[in-house]
Amino acid sequence: MADAEKPARAFPFIWIGIAGTVLWGVAVFYYLSHTGGLCTIFKANFNEVGDFLAGIFSSLAFLWFVLALLMQSRQIQMQAEELALQRQELQQTRKTLESQRDEMKEAARQAKAQAEAVRANELHARRASFYQLVFLIERELVFHASRLSAKLYGVKVASVGWERLSQGNPFSFQRQIVNLSQKKDVKIFHKPSEENAETMKKYCRIFEKLLEASDGCDDNFRNIRGQFEWSPNGELYALLCFTISRESKIEVADHSSLVRVLQLRRE
């Protein structure tokens, strides 16, 4: 658009130059016509002719020189205006890019917040399902612990565990087995029968499933897994793993004092 305006803005100066040249030519012709015409010029010597022509054309040259200066000045002004417009456009583009950058940062922040919210919802859903599974697994652990209690210590001792369970102690059998296993006169953990060993293996397998399930909904600090590892279920698990020579899945060195007591009993 600016390039198209250049000829239009320079056009008046050209017409002014042409009009001035025509008027100057008319004035020269008028002068010659009242001073003897061209014959007067031809009769004069070369110096006079040269001075006459120099006077005529120097005025025209000065006129066009002034017009050229005005045209150049106008072009410089137009270029300055174009540079100012370009600077404004660059500033507007920079503002647009900064606005887009801020929008992208905000979009990234919102996407991150949404991703965190989705992860939190997924983790909450997994934990809700996990705790429903925990309820069923712990009931199965109680069942096998009660069987072990009855087989190892008799029905009378197991009935005490059932009574405590009915009173609201969910780990009555686990605590009962662990506490009785540390007595000096109890040697049933040294060489368990095949039936008892099979029940112990079932208990260990079920507890290991509980640990595996907790890893899927635990945080980086493994708080949920740690709750089970340090619970009476984990204590009984460590005891049974030692009894049947099974590799323990508990990573921390918990219940080591209990295992050490049994080791001394066995020695």
Image (tube, grey):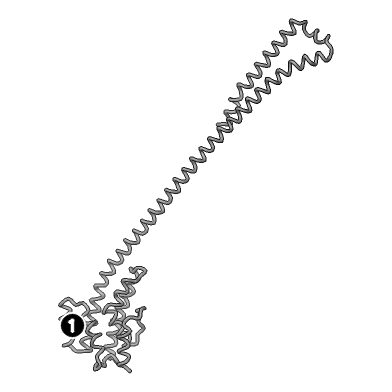
Of 39 and 66, nearer the camera is: 66
Amino acid type at circle 1 is Gly
Q: Nearer the viewer, residue 99 or 161?
A: 99
Question: Residue 67: x, y in percent?
Answer: 65, 22
Q: Position of residue 207 (x, y in %)?
A: 30, 78
Tell which of 116 and 83 is nearer to you.
83
Dot 1: element: helix
Q: In percent of the image, x 80 and y 10: which residue is there?
A: 41
Residue on which disc 1 sits: 161
> Quadrant location of residue 178?
bottom left
Left or right, residue 76 beside residue 28: left
Q: Position of residue 179 (x, y in %)?
A: 24, 86
Query: Which quadrant of the structure image shows residue 264?
Result: bottom left
Q: Quadrant of residue 69?
A: top right
Q: Residue at x 56, y 34 (%)?
A: 82
Image quarter (top left, top right, bottom left or bottom right) of the C terminus: bottom left
